[in-house]
Image (cartoon, rainbow, N blue to C red):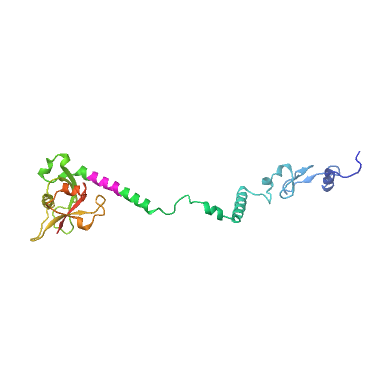
């Protein structure tokens, strides 16, 4: 037998619960539309209200203090932001490095441009090579190792009867350029005025970039082979027939 008559927790709860018929302690569910009664109530740990076994879950009885997954994620994010705002970031910033470079170094950009130019030059040359025609009857009998492929066009302003320019052709490496000028003048139907002098000029493009102005005019007495050895012309380059 106990030495004192202290009420147990169950006895204390029983005294607080309403009586149904004077013999059994029952609890009405907090849900108004529910008529279920329980001898042992289910108390929500969040809102503190009593519910039957059917409505004991927070989601079922619509607990006013229920946090959804979105609410919980938002609360966690806010707590993280508040915590990070209080951190001393100076040591971290002192040793951190950006994962991605915001600006491309000039050397890298130049390298990409150079590669693009080289690729474009190769494509231009291949197109010229595939469509090249002999520059006159003598050129058709030239061996392949003695042919020089180039593109030829009349300059703007010249009176021509042929408009399909530039044309791709092959010319003898050791032939004087005056012979090429004669062929181009005949092919394009260029009519020169009395006292007008025509010449050949290299046009700057992807094949011949950054060409100084003083090196663009070619001497008609020299050969393509001579200019190629000096690096002043390259196969596939574009020449214009111009007024000198």
So how many labels did they put on this image?
0
**Residue at image location 29% in from the left, 47% down from the top:** 118
Looking at the figure, which quarter contains the C terminus? bottom left
| Residue 66 locus on image (x, y percent) | 67, 49
Task: Tell whether 166 sits left or right of 41.
Answer: left
Residue 202 appears in view:
yes
| Residue 36 locus on image (x, y percent) | 75, 43
Main structural element of the magenta stretch: helix, strand or loop? Answer: helix
Give the quadrant of residue 241.
bottom left
Looking at the figure, which quarter contains the N terminus? top right
Q: Nearer the viewer, residue 67 or 155?
A: 155
| Residue 230 locus on image (x, y percent) | 20, 49
Q: Nearer the viewer, residue 17 or 182?
A: 182
Task: Tell whether 61 sits left or right of 209.
Answer: right
Residue that protrudes farthest toward the left in the picture: 194
Q: Is residue 177 magenta?
A: no
Residue 164 appears in view:
no
| Residue 163 locus on image (x, y percent) | 17, 53
User: In this picture, which residue range is highlighted in magenta?
Assistant: 117-127
Task: Tell whether 120 sits left or right of 8.
Answer: left
Residue that protrudes farthest toward the front in the picture: 230
């Amino acid at each position: 037998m106990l030495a004192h008559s202290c009420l147990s927790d169950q006895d204390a709860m029983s005294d607080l619960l309403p009586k149904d018929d004077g013999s059994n302690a029952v609890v009405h569910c907090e849900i108004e539309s529910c008529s279920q009664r329980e001898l042992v109530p289910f108390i929500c740990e969040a809102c503190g209200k009593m519910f039957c076994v059917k409505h004991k879950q927070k989601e079922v009885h619509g607990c006013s203090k229920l946090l959804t997954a979105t609410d919980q994620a938002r609360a966690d994010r806010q707590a993280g932001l508040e915590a990070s705002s209080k951190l001393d970031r100076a040591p971290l910033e002192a040793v951190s490095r950006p994962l991605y470079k915001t600006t491309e170094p000039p050397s890298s950009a130049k390298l990409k441009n150079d590669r693009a130019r080289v690729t474009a030059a190769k494509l231009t040359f291949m197109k010229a090579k595939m469509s090249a025609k002999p520059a006159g009857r003598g050129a058709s009998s030239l061996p392949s190792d003695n042919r020089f492929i180039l593109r030829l066009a009349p300059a703007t302003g010249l009176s021509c009867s042929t408009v399909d320019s530039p044309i791709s052709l092959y010319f003898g490496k050791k032939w004087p350029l005056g012979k090429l000028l004669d062929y181009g003048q005949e092919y394009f139907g260029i009519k020169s005025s009395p006292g007008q002098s025509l010449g050949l000029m290299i046009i700057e493009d992807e094949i011949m970039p950054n060409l100084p102005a003083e090196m663009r005019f070619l001497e008609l007495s020299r050969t393509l082979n001579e200019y190629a050895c000096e690096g002043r012309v390259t196969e596939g380059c574009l020449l214009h027939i111009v007024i000198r």
